[in-house]
Amino acid sequence: MRVSPSAAFALLTAVVGPAAASKYNVSFQSDASIDAALKALGRDSLRQPGTLPFPDLPPGTDTIPEIEHIVFLMLENHSYDNIFGMLSRGDGFTKGPDGKPLNTNPYPNGTIQHAFPMPNTCQLPQRPSQEWMASHNAYNNGSMDGFVRTQISPTIPEIVGGVAMGYYTAEHLPFTYSLAEQFPIADRWFCSVLAQTWPNRRYLIAGTSRGLTDDNSDITAGYAPAGTIFNEFDKYNISWLNYAADWTTISGATPDFYGANDYASEVRNVRNLSQFMVDARAGKLPAFSFLDPNYANQSQENPQNMVVGEALLADVVEAIGASPLWLKTLFILTYDEHGGYYDHVPPPPALKPDDVPPTVLPGEYQYEGFARYGFRVPAVMVSPYAKAGKYVSHVLYDHTSVLATLQRKWNLPSFTYRDANANDLLDMLDMEALKKQEPTFKTMPKLAAPGNTTEALACSKTGPGVIPPPGTVSNPKRR
């Protein structure tokens, strides 16, 4: 018989009695766990859901009027180390005297897989897993040594565990590296949960996944009672559009993924992704633009060629830079989750967003629940008022930091404990320059061209190369 998490909690309460009084008055997370999460965030007090960033101002008040347009793009399935491990700055790989990374992960038989540059930008069809169980096994109580072995399957021998230790360089992704060398990056942006795409994207728009832990469940079920950020935009007459490449074909995802739980609002606020480039160049962007790539070929998810997604990124950035709205625009780039790829930084403790436990079977890491972030992902902020000097933000972020930023700008109420206490992204902006209207980037700097998309289309013929490459696996040293 399967016992639901809520029933199990009720049974436990009946046996041992109610929990002791909490100084935070939060029944579903211990004081010690909350203290640890607040310490990681650099906070000394707990803000409640439903509260405003500026209680003395009416909700919907624009508190950063100098930025009139925010554009957001979330690509798919790559960890910080997988993309930015070899960047010239930030907390990437530990490098030896020869400049090569020293990071490793073991196989089940004890042999060692060393980090290695991918043979090319084609990805394996058998992607590394980022599922709830695989992610928790990779984390392995903070040892971060399970990335390779959790990928290996006795029933699917063609899955290559060593691929988790592959990484990309400026030679693979010249535009991405060029962008990250010019504009501020965040090296402590964690995805919101140790799980797949849908749970993380629901944190992004609603501050919670409402128990969702995978991509297979009905994502429209258990809709967050407080709605999403798009509902708030509608409520306070803040203009927004979802520029979505797949919006005519992923109808099953539309209610939760694209925005408001209101079909009329969806239709009214969705455009094809290609229209974004047109609108940006014409100076006709809404206050908030949410960009959804084509998940079949340009989101950078396996087995896509990475440079196709990079070409999309280049098109977006070029359109923003060429826009008459450039001096009033902020662009945020990040990834939804790690995609099964290695990262060396253990995710810190997090605030549980609400009292909804993860929908998993007993024994599937249900006890910690949502009280931990997922792995790090790449993040870049592009703006005329972005901090100069190759700035690296070491502030702790997760996807609800996007919510916190939008809520701070328009003084909107928070949804859950997670977004109410998330750090906003303003550390990457030069607020003094913004106030004085003295941009650090008056025009878009010259950036490298993206990788060759003509060659990218040949992946079906050339394949991803030999993974792992020869010479990247060793035996452990005997003591």
Image: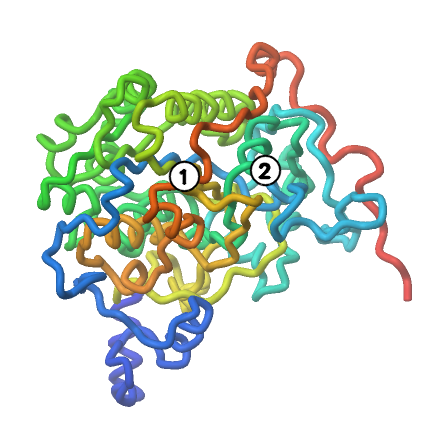
In the image, 344: left or right of 266?
A: right
Instruction: Bin the neighbour count of mark 2 within 10 Å (Cα to Cα): few under 14, some 14-19, many 20 and up.
Output: some
Residue 108 in view of the camera: yes
Q: Residues within 10 Å of mark 1 (few under 14, many from 20)?
A: some
- The residue to which callout 1 is attached is 439
Instruction: Say which amino acid is labelled 2.
Output: Glu
Q: Nearer the viewer, residue 223 or 428?
A: 428
Residue identifier under label 2: 181
Q: Amino acid at mark 1?
A: Pro
Quarter of the picture holding the C terminus: bottom right
The answer to whether residue 297 of the structure is visible from this angle is no
Q: CA distance from mark 1 to mark 2?
A: 18 Å
Q: Quadrant of the N terminus?
A: bottom left
Q: Residue 341's x, y, as percent?
A: 59, 43
Circle 2 sits in a helix, a strand or a loop, which is it?
Answer: helix
Residue depicted at x 37% and y 47%: 200
